[in-house]
Image (spheres, rainbow, N blue to C red):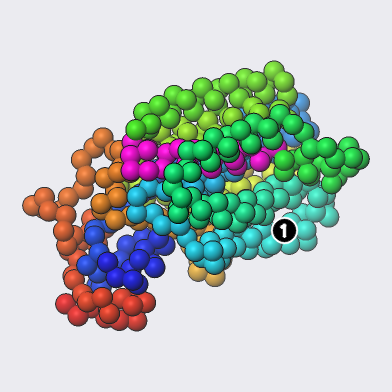
């Protein structure tokens, strides 16, 4: 395997069709369930904001798993290290997360501040705080991920420490003065999602290794379902701000998504996963517009009207997301993540799909890409930066 391929492989979906190296054939380690779960989690956030200040506000607990899920899954994939998955370099991690988290944050914050805040107040941008929170969490966690790459024997003790630290954060409140002020509310709001972040990283460590995910995948969905149901039931009983229950529900939803079988050809679910980010970013604008139209039409906040608002908010947000992502000039407003690939030797340790692996006609995997057809071999100099050289074969 050439040095150039090792440097670029973590961020490349597949080698170009006309210039593939002598590296092992790759298979995308794609979690189809996580893609679908992102959209449902975003819809949970939509539901929370939609029922706010309505007679149905106490039912917002049904969507409280959404934001903890995003916190947990973000740190899960940072700590999750199956064989062949290298730790990204510091500059690569910061640049990629800046593109995917902070650039949309700055843009959409400016849009909301100019167009929405004068009419609806600053509550319209309450959801955007999560993006810099997740960016900071990942950047701060990177040194620990790097250390664990060198000292792998610390993986399980570190996972136990993250679980305990999450429990302590969930059960002990911040000792801050001036309770009720805006800064106090924001600090406690951020603190409430620290447990889910730590537990997501712990799950990534526990499921890493040669066959970590294969060994426990059968149990992930049942355990996740119990956490999700128990968390929502506890929120219904004790209120929507109970940190332990919210974090448990979010981690449970993540485990359900990870417990679903993984398979090739998940492009449809990948598109669905891209929509989830757009729904999260855009939905307050759609909710405000929908509430204005409902008031003009004289509609009361009945159960039927709320259901129509919820469906319309999701549909319009998805439509706007699809339009923005189709154009190269606006795609950066709702960036998408790249599907990562691992060497064929590592795929067998991370793939637990019960179905048969895709093979070319004749049953041989060598020299064949299921996405691109036969692979033409070329020399290592041809892809020295994977763009400048042409294929020699």
Q: Is residue 66 visible?
A: no
Q: Nearer the viewer, residue 98 or 18?
A: 98
Q: Is residue 204 magenta?
A: yes
Residue 192: x and y in percent read 70, 37
Residue 366 visible, this orientation: yes
- Structural crowding at the residue carrying mark 1, measured as other residues with C-alpha within 10 Å and reported as few (<14), some (14–19) or many (≥20): some
Mark 1 lies on residue: 109
- Start and end of the magenta stretch? 192-214
Q: Residue at x 24, y 69 (%)?
A: 21
Question: In the rendered image, which quarter is residue 60 located in?
Answer: top right
Occupied quadrant, residue 17: bottom left
Number of callouts: 1
Is residue 341 shown above or below 185? below
Vertical order, 224 against 197 (above or below): above
Screen quadrant of the N terminus: bottom left
- Identify the residue shown where x is 30% and y is 66%: 15
């Amino acid at each position: 395997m050439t040095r150039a391929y090792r440097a670029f492989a973590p961020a490349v979906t597949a080698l170009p069709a006309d210039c593939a190296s002598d590296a092992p054939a790759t298979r995308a380690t794609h979690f189809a369930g996580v893609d679908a779960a992102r959209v449902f989690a975003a819809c949970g956030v939509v539901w929370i904001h939609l029922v706010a200040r309505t007679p149905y506000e106490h039912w917002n607990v049904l969507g409280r798993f959404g934001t903890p899920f995003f916190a947990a899954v973000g740190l899960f994939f940072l700590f999750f290290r199956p064989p062949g998955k290298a730790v990204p370099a510091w500059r690569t991690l910061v640049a990629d997360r800046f593109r995917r988290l902070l650039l949309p944050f700055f843009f959409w914050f400016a849009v909301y501040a100019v167009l929405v805040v004068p009419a609806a107040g600053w509550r319209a941008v309450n959801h955007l705080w999560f993006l810099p929170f997740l960016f900071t969490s990942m950047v701060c966690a990177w040194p620990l991920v790097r250390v664990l790459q060198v000292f792998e024997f610390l993986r399980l003790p570190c996972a136990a420490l993250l679980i305990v630290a999450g429990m302590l954060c969930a059960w002990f409140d911040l000792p801050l003065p001036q309770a009720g002020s805006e800064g106090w509310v924001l600090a406690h709001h951020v603190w409430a999602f620290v447990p889910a972040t730590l537990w997501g990283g712990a799950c990534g460590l526990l499921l890493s290794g040669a066959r970590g995910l294969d060994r426990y995948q059968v149990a992930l969905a049942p355990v996740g379902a119990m956490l999700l149901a128990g968390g929502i039931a506890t929120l219904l009983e004790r209120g929507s701000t109970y940190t332990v229950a919210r974090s448990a529900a979010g981690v449970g939803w993540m485990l359900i998504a990870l417990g679903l079988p993984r398979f090739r050809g998940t492009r449809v679910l990948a598109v669905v996963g891209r929509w989830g980010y757009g729904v999260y970013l855009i939905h307050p604008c759609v909710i405000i517009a929908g509430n204005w139209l409902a008031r003009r039409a004289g509609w009361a906040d009945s159960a039927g009207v709320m259901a129509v608002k919820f469906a319309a908010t999701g549909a319009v947000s998805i439509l706007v997301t699809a339009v923005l992502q189709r154009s190269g000039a606006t795609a950066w407003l709702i960036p998408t993540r790249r599907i990562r690939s691992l060497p064929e030797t590592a795929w067998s340790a991370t793939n637990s799909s019960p179905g048969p692996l895709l093979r070319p006609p004749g049953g041989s995997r060598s020299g064949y890409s299921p996405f691109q057809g036969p692979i033409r071999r070329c020399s290592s100099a041809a892809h020295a930066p994977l763009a400048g050289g042409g294929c020699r074969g």
